[in-house]
Image (tube, coloured by chain):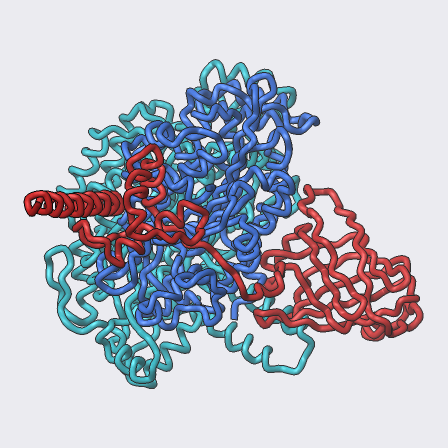
Amino acid sequence: MTKIKLKITLFAILMVFGTQVQAEENVLCIQKFLTKTVFNPGPSDGAWGKKTETAINQLMSQANNFEPQNIKKSDAENICKTLSGNQGSKLNEIGQFKRFPIVITEDIGEIKSLTDFDFTNSTISTNVTYKRCVFDIIHSEGWRRASGTVGINNGILVFKNHEWYAGLASSGREHLLNEEANLKLTNTGAHGILPHLSYVAEGEVDKPVQYLILGKDYIKPPPKCYSCSPSSLEEGILGSNNYTDDYGDTYTFKISSCS
Amino acid sequence: MYKNKHQWARKIGFGFRPDDNIPLDINAWNTDQLNNEFPSLGLNKVGLWPEKYNFSIKQRLERLDKHITYRNKVQAENIDRQEKNKRVRASKEEANVDKYDVYKLWNSAIYDNDIFKQRLLHFWTNHFTVGGSNGFRNFVIGDLIHNVIYKNLNGSFDDLLYLVTTHPGMLDYLDNQTSIGENSIEAKSRRKKGKHAGLNDNLARELLELHTVSPARKYSETDIRNTAKVLAGWGLFVGDFIELFNNHKKWKNISGNTKLEEFVLEPYIKRRAEPGKKVVMGKTFPSGPKALRKLTNMLANDDFTAQHLSKKLAIHFIGENASKDEVKIIYDTWKKSNGDLAEVHRATLKVAQATKTRKFLWPSTWMFQSIRVSGARFIKNVKSDGGFGRIQDNGRPVYEPKGILDEIGHNFWASRQPDGYSEKKLDWVSTEHLDRRIRIASRIFRAGASRSGEEIADLLDFSDRTKLAISKGRNSKEKFIIALCSSDFMEV
Amino acid sequence: MISRRHFLSIAAPALALSGYPVHGFTKEPIEGRIIVIMLQGGMDGLLAIPPVGDDNLFKQRKALVASNPLKLNPLFGIHPNFRNFSKMLKSNEASIVHATSFPYTGRSHFEGQNIAQSGSKLPFSTNTGWLGRAMDFAKITGKALSLDAPLLIRGAPEFDNFYPANIEKTRSPQTALIDLIKETHDGDVMIAIDKLSRGSMSRPSRLRARDPLSLATKAGESMRELNGPRVAVLTIPEFDDHSSIGSTTGHHPELFTLLDNVFYNLKTALKEQWDNTIVLTTTEFGRTVQENGSAGTDHGYGSVGLLAGGLINKSSVVANWPGLASKDLYEKRDLFATIDYRSVCSACIEAAFGLEHDFIIEKVFEDKKIARIYEHIFG
């Protein structure tokens, strides 16, 4: 009786031992695989520790669209099979680089185009109509950033043509450039306008139609006066407002000489 | 093999004008080219460049200083912004002398007789590139070109190297004026105030990599670092040069009786220098200002410098495919003469005379040759006509000389990287570049060329193929353009 | 304070367009488009994409960290000036590769720029670029047709037997003259003149528009066309900030805004073709971790690569982060590069041109083993 018990016990011990050996082999198999990747499993000792668990979970998560895995020691055999199977080389490739998913929770803030000007509090009434006015966007240091002609249709600005000055405008050398016009006059009732493609070949004039609705009040310009001195013509400026951007540059948007 | 004197004059110079005296003895002419004071050939009214358009470095900085003072005054005034701006612009335009510098370069290439020297001037200016800026460096670039490089083409290379390295323009261009020794008095004082201060290795790196030994020497990052330590304390911002000079004198960083014209030649502030010895490429340098000369001498005399620069000279004059033997001739002369530039340039002449290799000309070289050889009245000759003119178009002054250099993509006053303009043919062969050459050839014609396309083709022994193409041009303008844009003219 | 107009007077930005399908020669035009933005001078990757989760960041470069980076994940943030690019990250149209570099540690601009274009391991060892060679093998013709041909897109001459179609219908009256000039030349010059006579890109090139933003719009518009170029190379210079590099504001950050708007302009102009496009930045090296004496940084090693385009499916930051402790730095001064940037280039070629990774490594990069990073960027 004892002999059989002994045999059974021995057999049981061997079974457990064997399973344990097998288990260790599985863990070793996983660790050896991971060592060839950037997911460090710690020493290849066949022992399933925190490092090994973290590493294999990270690798498999990265391989599965960043879904969190829940791989435990008990899964070792299956995992080892997977790693040794035909998925193995793909997983090895994935393991060469760590990929950090991006989760942006903060507000990115308003996108500012370089030609984005926010002339809050610009004032033009909704029942004002002029066929043609001149507009300028002027930097506080005196150089022109943009200019062109604009019509006003019941308070809506219709840009007829415009040119943006780029380059060494401040030192007097001006390169004319028909550039993206992202004029945005914001106030209650104002809209931003869509950027339009602006790269215009030399000699051509870009004729975009842009609509902006501005605020309610306006300053009525004085009647046209050809014999007046320049300064009094300046006074006939419709809507003249300042805007300071993130870089500390201040611009004035002026509309004048309307007819 | 340059039997044709006109071709020879193009190979190593800018060609002969229609009204130039063609020398009978080309060897004697070669020798004369290398002399310091080149005598006029007689027929040409070649006078001296008007003194009033010569500006020393001191004068340039003074003009700049005057402008800055005026600018500050105007900014503080209570007048309209637009008006302020206009006045400041006008003041800068008046104070800046780079328009004279550019004009001098043009004038010399087109009218002067020491054409080999002019080519050497262009070569060394490109080697020691100092890029322009929107600020104030353009005030002094011309000084480096006309007063430093031009006047030191016959001496030894180590003189030239030192003069260029210590030039305010070069120091400013590669940010050395911000480089402060980490253990200098200045750095310690700044750190106490919570500000930072330290070395900037930009000039050090380029001094080794581009100007002298080149990476073939296999120097280490430590060598660069220690070179930066030797260079620390040299240079001041060009824009504030005089004000800083006066301040440093006040703070006793510069001795009270130092004159500006002395300081400007060796602008060194001890307070910002790194104390102690420095080891560069195995050699030890003491602290103090004299170390820099010792360092540049070592670099100038290094074998790798001789190799590097001999090769560059060969490529510039002989062509991209200059052979190892051709380079060796120049190199041997360099070694034997210890970097005597007169000897080295003489050797370059010798090799160029014997070579079969052709060089695809730089845009500016090609353009100056086009104007010179055709005799076109593209710009006025300052010396004989007196005064400036802008570039002519059908008799009307139209273009700025600097603008044209920009258009052909080869402007020594342009902002650019320190390795300068390429000597590789491929870099100048794009539709863009060629398109511009064709348009400029057209403009040169309109400026009144006295040699036609066919005459040029005969004069320079063009190939039959090219002569045939020229003959198919429908009018004299087309023939002219074909001649100038042919491979025979673009390469020599 | 440097104002915005500085952007528009940048020294020498340039655009090269290449790879036009040629009527009669190209059977099936490739749909994918590649745009390379070359940032010349050495971009400061740590300033652009600060590893905010690395404690050593603030220890090593206190003054050179933006005060309000946008957080991307626990380890990385992005400089606030990258607003448009951040939006693309949020909508899975962009990705970042960090601590990366071409296999070059020499810190010379000229060698570095050459290697970033040639794709070789030795500087000045070849006359072709990795993108040019990729186009050779993808059988994309009409290659060297460009305003200026940077090394990056130069292919082997024997592959460029095809002349591009006449893009613009009108022929310049000068054509006859140009043809005569061509008769006097051989080789490269003759080819270049020939292209000139076909009135191709020469007209737009005379425009004085020199700023990267309009060039980007131009590139996008051209590449949107069915018979338009498949490849564009945009160069933005001036990243070499040895002094006053800036942190939240300053010169480098302004260049970030510029770069950000370049991405935006490209996307806007490409419209529906954005889906078939990949844009990637290259730079010759990064910058030192610590600042130098002039509030700037000197040349370094590892930097970042920014990628965007509809070909990307899921945004992420790919990095084998080496750390910023002094012991983790390259030569105790630079961010280590743990990813070979050629892997990124290969992945882009694979995504846009459909060539296989092993083929690209062998033929385009002429190397034995470069890891495949395709899945991490496009998967």
Q: Colour of chain C?
A: blue
In this view of the protein, which residue sits in the foreground, A191 or A83? A83
Residue C155 in which image quadrant: top left
* Front-lying residue, B169 or B173: B173
Chain B, hue in figure: cyan
Is residue A92 in view from this perspective? yes
Measured as percent of width and height from the top left, residue C146 is found at: 53, 34
As drawn, the chain in red is A
Q: Left or right: where does residue C127 sit relative to residue B183?
A: right
Residue at the spot 31% in from the left edge and 72% down from the top edge:
C59
Q: Position of residue C213 (x, y in %)?
A: 58, 51
Among the 4 quarters of the image, the one containing residue A129: bottom right
Above or below, comparing residue B274 to residue A95 in the picture = below
Figure label count: 0
> Among all residues in the image, which is located at the extreme front?
A1
**Residue at x 47% of width, y 60% of height:** C72
